[in-house]
């Protein structure tokens, strides 16, 4: 019995050693570098050799398990053969000793029974379903990241999700639609100066204006975060960040204040009343059209309905959603 326990313990330790392998830091968003610490003979997994998992699936894990499984089968077969020979050798050298003959019989019988269990279990699993011993894995497709940006075609530009911008139109993640030129324009940093300090928000050059600001300066081709990182500015600075705000809410910033005539949509700040095909209303998905909503099969967004905006500065602020400019109507696909 002690011999059996020792063999089982050694086999378990051997299989555990094969499983010791560590993934390294991801090379890209989808690639993972896998460096086994112990080689698996007769496989592609060798100690110290980097194995790159390019596809976002469980296939590499299945291949590693197959390598360990096949090598484990070989080890079990070799150990059983060694034990069988050891039992025969003990029997030959027993000299008629009944205790040694009994020990030899026990070793030989145990090795034969072990081999039979190994072969029969493999046959049964393969008969039920060959995939139970092949370890074939199913590839898991990656989920497409949904981001909002500017979609530019030969006919129009629009602010949509990347999955809704069909070819041959071009999608620009860090741009906004400029309806005056019917093109997608890269964002810049808009610096607005008020009596309580300066406000910084990512916007288009044509949208860098505010009716209550003392000055408006546009810094092209740079985000406000990058622009401020190069400046020694720390007093009365308000960085407008819409990434944490819901669509249709006022532009709040971490300093606990808000910017009037500024509304958040698609994680971006929009100044003033909405122009043609710009976002409007109190909820996401509403756009300004020159036609009546009912005439084009859409639903009117009652952006003039007041609601309570629970802000940091004053919890009793009551305001309307962003309204469309003169002659435009705020429409949504949902009622």
Image (cartoon, grey):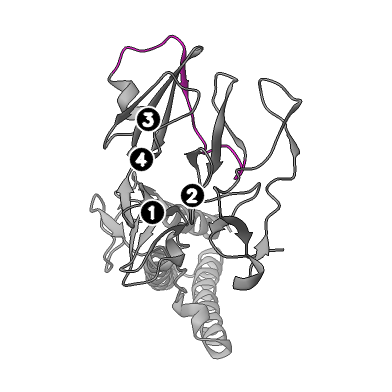
Residue 300, quarter of the rendered image: bottom right
Q: Does residue 236 lie above or below 251 as drawn?
A: above
Residue at 66% x, 23% y is: 312
- Which numbered disc, 2 or 1, marks the residue that appears first in the sequence? 1
Q: Does residue 4 lie above or below 24 as drawn?
A: below
Describe the element under mark 3 as helix, strand or loop.
strand
Report the Cα–Cα distance between label 4 and label 1: 10 Å
Q: Please state the extent of the stretch shown in magenta in the rendering.
A: 231-248
Relative side of 258 to 188, left or right = right
Relative side of 300 to 22, left or right = right
Q: Residues within 10 Å of mark 2 (few under 14, many from 20)?
A: many
Relative side of 314 to 215, left or right = right
Residue at 26% x, 52% y is: 47
Residue 275 is labelled as: 2
Q: Where is residue 56 in the image (x, y as percent from the top left)?
A: 40, 62
According to the picture, the residue beneath numbered tag 3 turns out to be 190
Q: Position of residue 225 (x, y in %)?
A: 37, 28
Question: How many labels sit on residues?
Answer: 4
Residue 206 is labelled as: 4
According to the picture, the residue beneath numbered tag 1 turns out to be 179
Contact (CB < 8 A) between labels 2 and 1? yes
């Amino acid at each position: 019995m002690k011999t059996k326990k020792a063999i089982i313990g050694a086999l378990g330790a051997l299989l555990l050693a094969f499983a010791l392998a560590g993934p390294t830091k991801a090379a890209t968003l989808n690639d993972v570098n896998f460096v086994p610490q112990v080689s698996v003979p007769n496989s592609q997994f060798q100690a110290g050799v980097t194995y790159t998992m390019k596809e976002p699936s469980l296939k590499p894990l299945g291949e590693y398990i197959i390598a360990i499984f096949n090598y484990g089968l070989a080890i079990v077969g070799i150990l059983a053969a060694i034990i069988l020979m050891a039992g025969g050798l003990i029997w030959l050298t027993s000299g008629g000793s009944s205790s040694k003959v009994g020990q030899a019989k026990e070793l030989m019988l145990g090795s034969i029974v072990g081999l039979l269990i190994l072969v029969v279990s493999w046959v049964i699993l393969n008969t039920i379903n060959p995939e139970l011993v092949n370890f074939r894995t199913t590839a898991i497709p990656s989920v497409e990241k949904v981001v909002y940006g500017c979609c530019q075609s030969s006919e129009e530009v629009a602010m949509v999700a990347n999955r809704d911008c069909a070819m041959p139109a071009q999608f620009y993640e860090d741009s906004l639609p400029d309806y005056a030129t019917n093109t997608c324009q890269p964002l810049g940093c808009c610096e607005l100066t008020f009596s309580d300090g300066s406000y910084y928000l990512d916007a288009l050059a044509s949208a860098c204006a505010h009716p209550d600001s003392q000055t408006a300066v546009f810094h092209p081709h740079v985000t406000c975060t990058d622009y401020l990182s190069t400046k020694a500015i720390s007093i009365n600075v308000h960085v407008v960040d819409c990434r944490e705000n819901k669509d249709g809410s006022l532009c709040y910033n971490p300093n606990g204040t808000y910017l009037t005539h500024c509304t958040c949509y698609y994680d971006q700040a929009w100044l003033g009343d909405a122009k043609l095909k710009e976002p409007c209303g109190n909820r996401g998905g509403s756009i300004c059209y020159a036609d009546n909503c009912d005439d084009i099969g859409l639903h009117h967004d009652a952006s003039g309905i007041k609601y309570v905006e629970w802000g940091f500065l004053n919890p009793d602020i009551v305001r309307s959603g962003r309204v469309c400019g003169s002659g435009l109507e705020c429409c949504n696909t949902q009622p």
